[in-house]
Amino acid sequence: MPIAGKATLTQYIIEERRRHPGATGALNALITDVSLACKAISRKVALGALGDVLGSASTQNVQGEEQKTLDVLSNDMFLRANEWGGHVAGMVSEEMEEPYLPPQQQYPRGKYLLLFDPLDGSSNIDVNVAVGSIFSILRAPTPEADAKPEDFLQPGTEQVGAGYAIYGPSTMLVLTLGNGTHAFTLDPQLGEWVLSHPNLSIPRQTSEFAINASNSRFWEPAVKRYVDECLAGKEGPRGIDFNMRWIASLVAETHRILMRGGVFMYPRDSKEAGRDGRLRLLYEANPISFLIEQAGGMASTGRRRLMAVEPESIHQRIGFVFGSSDEVARVEAYHSEEPQDTYQAPLFGKRGLFATAA
């Protein structure tokens, strides 16, 4: 029964299933398993130093990034919670180089693929800033068989579900199954996810943006133009004052935008040659894009719709701009106006240290 007149996560996904008479319930069960993993991670995060889970694990993930102790624990919690139910044919994680297949002799294969970042923003753990988990659900091309690496290389438009959990002052699960974006708050006494924010909606306009300004010397001209205009405030071409935010946690940035609007930018830049962006396409950008679009916002590479991108590799990185649609459209428009040969490192620009003579 509803709690204080609000539906639980279980009730919500059952109602969604009723909208699709042919559904088997496997997707419901998978979401329930994911939500259990998020509860377990939330408990570990909340314990902090008391749980002896802070600090480095003295290892690196596939991207060469230092793993925190909670990165490793959270990854294991996702695997253990989702391998046994027979709902997935394979899983991909930020923390693992290759896809994970449930132990063949123990558990059957299912018809879905689960992709996840088990603990986004983990660099903030030791300073007690909000972190979270991100997940994406795809259909397995060959149900009930071992998933192959190429099976995961599907554009974001093929997602059947996506969401994140945020571990902050309260723990929340934000979910879309393609019928709007909805937020559930964990009632710690009942252990239930309660629908607290149905049908989230992002305003088209905003006066708030988020970007890592320390990378400004590497930005493309379109991004620099956009940020410069925002910083110029009322006296500039936009005619309004903007606020700038940066939390260094994708989940926390997304949550703020879903709750009150704004635009987030982690664009392609020239900081590392040959890299198209910082964030991962399959298990960060795609699921966040699905949530944002279902809430009426816009998600882009800076040049085109992000969920239309055809993935080339499991851990592919990409530039990411999302949030209030008018602002994302403006960034895209600025990119379309700039010459295509202006993407240069500052040291090699027309006035750079290593500029060649005309």
Image (cartoon, rainbow, N blue to C red):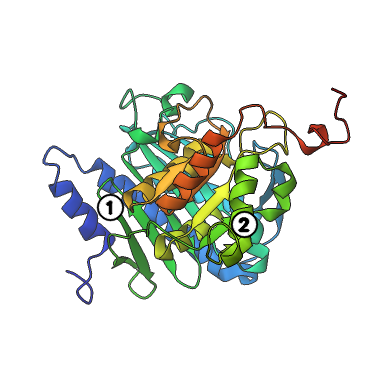
The location of residue 138, given as percent across then percent down, is: 36, 35
Q: Residue at x 25, y 49 (%)?
A: 179
Q: Residue at x 28, y 63 (%)?
A: 198
The location of residue 45, given as percent across then percent down, is: 55, 64
Residue 62 location, quadrant: top right
Q: Nearer the viewer, residue 342 or 14?
A: 342
Horizontal side, residue 39 vs residue 271: left or right: left
Count numbered badges in the picture: 2
In the displayed structure, 56 sits above or below 44; it is: above
In the displayed structure, 132 sits above or below 26; it is: below
Q: Nearer the viewer, residue 324 or 52?
A: 324
Residue 299 location, quadrant: top left
Q: The residue tagged with tag 1: helix, strand or loop? A: loop
Give the residue type that dot 1 points to: Gly
Q: Which residue is mark 1?
A: 180
Question: For the N terminus, which image quadrant?
Answer: bottom left
Q: The residue tagged with tag 2: helix, strand or loop? A: loop
What is the crowding at mark 2: few (fewer than 14 residues within 10 Å), some, or many (at least 20)? Answer: some
Q: Nearer the viewer, residue 139 or 183?
A: 183
Question: For the C terminus, which image quadrant?
Answer: top right
Give the residue type that dot 2 points to: Ala
What is the crowding at mark 1: few (fewer than 14 residues within 10 Å), some, or many (at least 20)? Answer: some
Q: Which residue is mark 2?
A: 248
How far apart are the alpha carbons under marks 1 and 2? 26 Å
Q: Is residue 282 visible?
A: yes
Q: Is residue 246 visible?
A: no
